[in-house]
């Protein structure tokens, strides 16, 4: 028989609330190239295009299994490239042991929505939205 677990909204919200606090004052790094297989996989051959900082309280309250990031301050890009994925790291994050999660980047239909489909070194990188969803 196939696996088909379902959670209540309360359970999904509790799961999100338990791990989203890891991102308080953490980092949001945007890369080009292929996203690694898991958030625990080291980066290989990707260029860091921009590094942004999460707020002291990174996400608002979870509702119906969804948490939305608080405002993320824009930065000037470190390099030029096509953003394809991001990695979210906890406070002081420096290596793979500090990763919390990865996701897709784009101008629509992605986990992380930003202001431009291409990033140019020195140009402003702005986050339009970032949401995380815990399936119910």
Image (cartoon, rainbow, N blue to C red):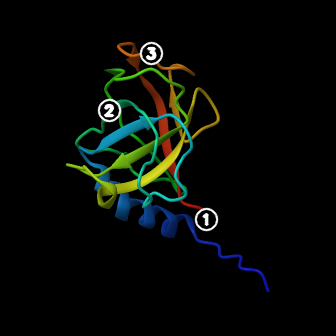
Residue receiving disc 1: 136
Which quadrant holds residue 96? bottom left
> Which one is in front, 92 or 44?
44
Within 10 angstroms of label 2, few (less than 14), some, or many (20 or more) residues?
many
- CB under 8 Å between discs 1 and 2: no
Q: Which mark is residue 52?
A: 2
User: What x and y, as percent, mark residue 114?
Assistant: 50, 26
The part of the image, by quadrant, that contains residue 55 is top left
Assign a secondary structure to mark 3: loop
Inter-mark Cα distance, 1 to 2: 30 Å
Q: Earlier in the sequence, mark 2 or mark 3?
A: 2
Q: Which image quadrant: the C terminus?
A: bottom right
- Could you say where residue 12 lies in the image, as x and y percent from the top left? 51, 65
Where is mark 3, residue-wise? 120
Residue closest to the eye, 131 or 81 = 81
| SS assignment at label 1 | loop
What SS does tag 2 mark?
Answer: strand
Residue at image point 46% right, 61% down: 13
Q: Give the spatial CA distance, label 2 vs label 3.
A: 15 Å
Q: Residue at x 71, y 76 (%)?
A: 4
Query: Dividing the image into 4 quarters, which one contains the N terminus?
Result: bottom right
Q: Is residue 28 above or below residue 99?
A: above
């Amino acid at each position: 028989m196939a696996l088909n677990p379902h959670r209540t909204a309360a359970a999904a919200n509790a799961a999100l609330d338990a791990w989203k606090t890891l991102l308080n004052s953490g980092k949001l790094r945007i890369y080009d190239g292929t996203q690694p297989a898991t958030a625990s996989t080291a980066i290989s051959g990707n260029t860091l295009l921009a590094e942004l900082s999460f707020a002291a309280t990174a996400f608002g309250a979870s509702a119906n299994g969804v948490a939305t990031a608080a405002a993320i301050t824009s930065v000037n890009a470190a390099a030029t490239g096509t953003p394809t994925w991001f990695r979210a790291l906890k406070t002081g994050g420096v290596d793979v042991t500090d990763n919390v999660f990865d996701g897709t980047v784009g101008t629509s239909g992605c986990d992380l929505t930003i202001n431009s489909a291409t990033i140019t070194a020195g140009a402003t990188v702005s986050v339009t939205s970032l949401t995380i969803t815990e399936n119910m």
